[in-house]
Structures are given as structure tokens and as C-alpha cells.
């Protein structure tokens, strides 16, 4: 990055410094990818918790308490 100005008598080029420090580039947010990842993670969490809970629900109360401990 070149800080010295091409203008005589001016030590720093304020425009270049401003662009270097505050020059943000906005990009599009990948909404589809975020939504896809959220749906897959929710599906994975439900699959992981539903199958063991289904097995425990089929047991009687005493066996299900012993299985949790």
C-alpha cells in the first residue's frame, strides 16, 4: 500500500487511507446454503434423539428409568 501522495505538499493521500481502512466490500449472503445447513442439522438432531426416545417409550416405567441412569 502506498501512503505517499502524488500531490506535492501533501504527505498522505487521505482518499487512499480512507479506502484502505474503511473500504468495505459487500457480498451477497449465501441464504440457500445457510438454510440447507440449518435444515440438515435440525434433521440430524431429531433423528439422533427420536430413535432412543422411541425405544424408551416402548419400555415400562421402571426399565426406562434404569436405562436413563
Image (cartoon, rainbow, N blue to C red):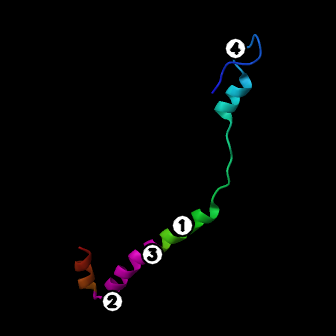
Judge the density around disc 4: few (<14), some (14-19), many (≥20) Cα neighbours within 10 Å.
few
Compared across the picture, whether 48 is left or right of 62 comes to right
- Cβ–Cβ under 8 Å for marks 1 and 3: no
Say which residue label 1 marks: 38
Identify which residue, 1 or 65, lies in the foreground: 1
The residue tagged with tag 1: helix, strand or loop? helix
Of callouts 1 and 3, which one flags the residue occurring earlier in the amino acid sequence? 1
- Is label 4 or label 3 in front? 4
Of marks 4 and 1, the one in the foreground: 4
According to the image, label 3 marks what residue?
46
Q: Mark 2 points at which residue?
A: 58
Label of residue 11 in the image:
4
How many marks do you count on the picture? Answer: 4
**Left or right of residue 24, residue 55 in this image:** left
Question: Residue reaching furthest top?
Answer: 9
Residue 12 rendering spot, x and y as whole percentages: 69, 18
- Describe the element under mark 3 as helix, strand or loop: helix
Residue 47 percent location from the top left of the image: 43, 77
- CA separation, marks 2 and 3? 18 Å
The residue depicted at 59 percent of the width and 64 percent of the height is: 33
Does the stretch in magenta take in 46?
Answer: yes
* Foreground tag (2 vs 3): 3
Residue at far right of view: 7
Residues 68 and 44: in front is: 44
Residue 18: in magenta span: no
Q: Which residue is drawn at 24% across and 84% down?
A: 63
Which of marks 3 and 2 precedes in the sequence? 3
Amino acid at each position: 500500500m502506498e501512503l505517499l501522495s502524488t500531490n506535492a505538499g501533501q504527505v498522505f493521500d487521505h482518499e487512499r487511507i480512507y479506502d484502505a481502512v474503511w473500504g468495505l466490500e459487500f457480498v451477497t449472503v449465501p441464504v440457500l446454503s445457510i438454510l440447507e445447513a440449518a435444515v440438515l442439522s435440525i434433521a440430524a438432531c431429531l433423528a439422533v434423539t427420536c430413535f432412543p426416545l422411541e425405544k424408551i417409550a416402548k419400555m415400562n416405567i421402571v426399565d426406562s428409568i434404569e436405562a436413563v441412569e
